[in-house]
Image: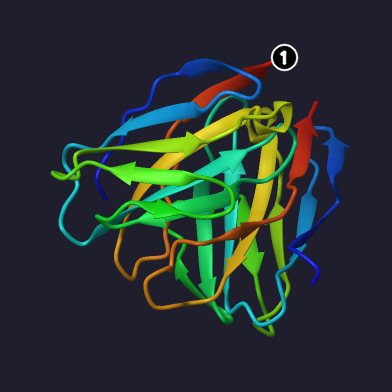
Amino acid sequence: DAKTTQPTSMDCAEGRAANLPCNHSTISGNEYVYWYRQIHSQGPQYIIHGLKNNETNEMASLIITEDRKSSTLILPHATLRDTAVYYCIVLIQGAQKLVFGQGTRLTINP
Amino acid sequence: EAGVVQSPRYKIIEKKQPVAFWCNPISGHNTLYWYLQNLGQGPELLIRYENEEAVDDSQLPKDRFSAERLKGVDSTLKIQPAELGDSAVYLCASSIRQAGNTGELFFGEGSRLTVL
């Protein structure tokens, strides 16, 4: 599976959009981009995934660049409860083995 | 619908003692995972089951760790004997194979082990 690179930490003001970048320059054509988050003392939680088109659900939006070498997770109106570690993972189609990196620790400030 | 249930949530033992963790996946989920998470790190896969078959146990330290999923539903992860370095959170997850979204796993809250 392709390796991902994320900033170690980020801050965002409550109510603003949180934009979390992820670099996956070695991604191959059949690998999806998945995002999970892990709130303190809880297990990871699935957020969203995509292949090459932008995706949106009730939690977030995922923007994938045209060359698919990077992506951005967008939390449109961040709240204090969005404070968590966010993991960007690339996963080959059909596979079920998630490989987590160290993620980005996002802190939402009041 | 109940999520993935793990017990115990916390366990403190002395080194060389045995310990066991239990996981009940979401009903109907045929795939079950055990992950290990050290402090400040992302989770690492220990073992993956498809029904009752362990299909990926390459990262499971088999000298002291064992796991079972006898009826293809709930699972137990055992450590015997525990070492100081085993202090970590043990996460269980489950999933159901769906076209286009095989990476959506549902995690339990984890079992935090402290070995003294």
Residue B71 on image: x %, y %: 69, 85
Q: How does the figure colour the protein chain or chains?
A: rainbow
Q: Which quadrant of the figure has residue A20?
A: top left
Q: Residue at x 56, y 17 (%)?
A: A12
B77 sits to left or right of A53:
right
Spot occupied by residue B56 in the image (x, y as percentages of width and height): 43, 65
Other-residue count near label 1 (Cα within 10 Å), few / some / many at <14 / 14–19 / ≥20: few
Residue wearing tag 1: A110
User: Which residue is found at the position 40% from the left and 20% from the top?
Assistant: A7
- The x, y position of residue A104, in whole percent, is 48, 26
Quadrant that contains the C terminus of chain A: top right
Q: Residue at x 42, y 68 (%)?
A: B101
- Residue B114 appears left or right of B62: right
Up-down relation of residue B33 to residue A80 (above or below): below
Can see residue B107? Answer: yes
Residue situated in front as seen by the camera: B21 or A87: A87
In the displayed structure, A95 sits above or below A64; it is: below
What element does badge 1 sit on?
A: loop
Q: Residue at x 53, y 71 (%)?
A: B49
Between B38 and B109, the one nearer to me in the picture: B109
Q: Is residue B55 above or below residue A49?
A: below
> How many dots with numbers?
1
Q: Nearer the viewer, residue A106 or A44?
A: A106
Subunit under mark 1: A
Please state if A56 lies on the left or on the right of B17 as rendered.
Answer: left
Residue A107's quadrant in the figure?
Answer: top right
Q: Position of residue B78 (x, y in %)?
A: 71, 56
Horizontal arrangement in the rendering, residue A41 relative to residue B11 (left or right): left
At label 1, which amino acid type do we have?
Pro
Residue B61 in view here:
no
